[in-house]
Image: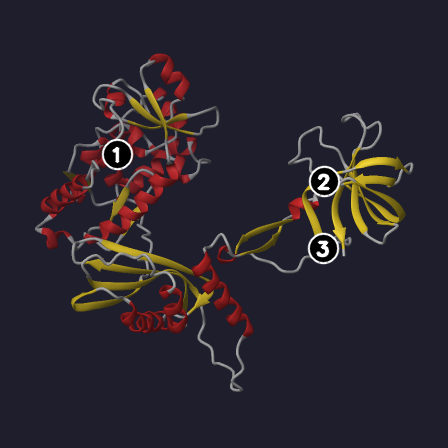
Amino acid sequence: MDRWRRITAQQRTLPDDVVPVVLSAHGTHGPVVYAVNAAGLARGICVDARVVDVQAIHPDMHVEQGDQNGDRALLDRLAMWARRWCPWTVAEADGMLMDVRGAAHLFGGEVQMLRDMHGRFAMQGLRARLALAPTRGAAQMLARFGAQGVICGPEDVAQVLAPLSVAALRLPSDTIRLLDRLGLKTIGALEGVPRVGLMRRFSGAAEERNPLVLLDRALGRSADPLDAPPDVQIWRAYARMAEPVIDPIPWLGGLAEDLTTQLAAAEQGARRLRLTIYRVDGEWRFRDVSTASASRDPAHFVRLVTGKLEGIDPGFGFDLMTLEALNAEPLSLHQDQLGGARDASADIAALLDRLTAKLGSSKVTWAVWLQSHKPERVERGVPVLAGGGQTVAEVAHERPLRMFDPPEEIAVLYAVPEGPPARFRWRRVAFLMARFEGPERIAPEWWRDRAGTRLRDYYKVEVTDGRRFWLFREGIVGDARGGAPRWFVHGVFG
């Protein structure tokens, strides 16, 4: 909700403290509430409720489509940014976990560290609910259901968690309803009942649905380690100038050499590069280039970037320039051929890179082959730097070198029964068939085409002047899928 509020702050006029606003997501039985603002929470609107049910109770509620992928990406970036406080951070579905053991004294103690966290999140327009506890589960529970900024010591975990609702264990709704019918509404009540009978009741449930397993983890009775992802590897070369300059070209060679040295040490190759200049007025400009295959050739990097510098605005000059590998792939170290022969595949990849940098990614394409019955759907052109290009396809039948998309309808003057037309007219010219081969029947794609789509019978036809056509009849007589069959020319041989 905070992310949506930041995005729409300039265009919306809804009073956030009066009008309930919810973000929706796709659910099993229609849209469900994905997030809700403070006004909605005050009215009792809860997450996972069906939007239509909530709208019936609150007709003035404003609904926006949520962006779960965008929220996840933001949390992932925040998790890396939060490593300013500790090296072990991980993003969850609706929050973030940090293992700050041994780091609090660097910020003046636990209280000062939480205050610093709250202030830095607020500077980014994000409201953070913070809690510090000795276990992962206890911190999650206190952050969502406890007081703001609570700090819980190892000896106080059971006492602090006792008044919280069992919903703090983040159990499924059916499990919470069952515990409520049993009279177990708080963590203290759950902790006070005999474990044998309750464990037998949930013996077949998964760990994330078993309240006793989750409670033991929160109280520190069983291990619940934090599996933090590794730091994102950054390959970046810097060039700092003693005074502002206008032309970046003299520094490109050194930047490329530095970057390729870093990549070689990690046995990586760059697939996407970014050159950034930092101007003296505080602005920056960048240019991105991509490669068809992983590369560590500094001369190739310089050629690609040089071709993209036209139009970059240095302003009154820049005093810092960086060259960064935004995407990298494994590229093992190898020895060049002793005979001095050039690698033809590397030359082709370099040519494709230079053409794409000069003309644009949409102008340089190659063919990819798709699984389809219909010939016009088999081949598709995609940018060469998108990957997946293929130059060879195995087909069961001969196909014409020149194909029409879409196929062009022809007028049949006389047709051979159960065969191709003996005479037909195409582009105002009449043709007389000399010989033919076929048919090759292609059925509709039932998983893709409409219910009324008709099958095709293809024929290779040679006319009296020697030209060869690829014709097909769409439908057959009496197939109950339309009127009379129609004829088309789909390609020309030779």
Q: Residues within 10 Å of mark 2 (few under 14, many from 20)?
A: some
Q: What amino acid type should be assigned to the residue bearing mark 1? A: Asp
Q: Report x, y in % for residue 419.
A: 88, 40
Q: What amino acid type should be assigned to the residue bearing mark 3? A: Leu
Report if residue 306 is visible in the image: yes
Residue 24 lies left or right of residue 440; in this view the side is: left
Q: Secondary structure at mark 1?
A: helix
Q: Is residue 272 above or below residue 160?
A: below
Q: What amino acid type should be assigned to the residue bearing mark 2? A: Glu
Q: Which-is-in-front pick, marks 3 and 2? A: 2
Q: Report x, y in % for residue 299.
A: 39, 73
Q: Report x, y in % for residue 362.
A: 49, 52
Gap in angstroms between the C-alphas marked 3 and 1: 56 Å
Q: Which residue is mark 3?
A: 401
* Sequence order check, earlier mark of 3 and 2: 3
Q: Which residue is mark 1?
A: 2
Residue 46 lies left or right of residue 204; in this view the side is: left
Q: Is residue 71 above or below residue 451?
A: below
In the image, farthest residue toward the front:
428
User: What residue is shown at x 23% (from left), y 49% (from top)?
Assistant: 82
Q: Secondary structure at mark 3?
A: loop
User: What residue is shown at x 31% (from left), y 69% (from top)?
Assistant: 252
Residue 462 lies left or right of residue 306; in this view the side is: right
Q: Which-is-in-front pick, marks 3 and 1? A: 3
Quick one: quadrant of the N terminus?
Answer: top left
In the image, farthest residue toward the left:
108
Q: Residues within 10 Å of mark 3 (few under 14, many from 20)?
A: few
Gap in angstroms between the C-alphas marked 3 and 2: 16 Å
Q: Which residue is mark 2?
A: 408
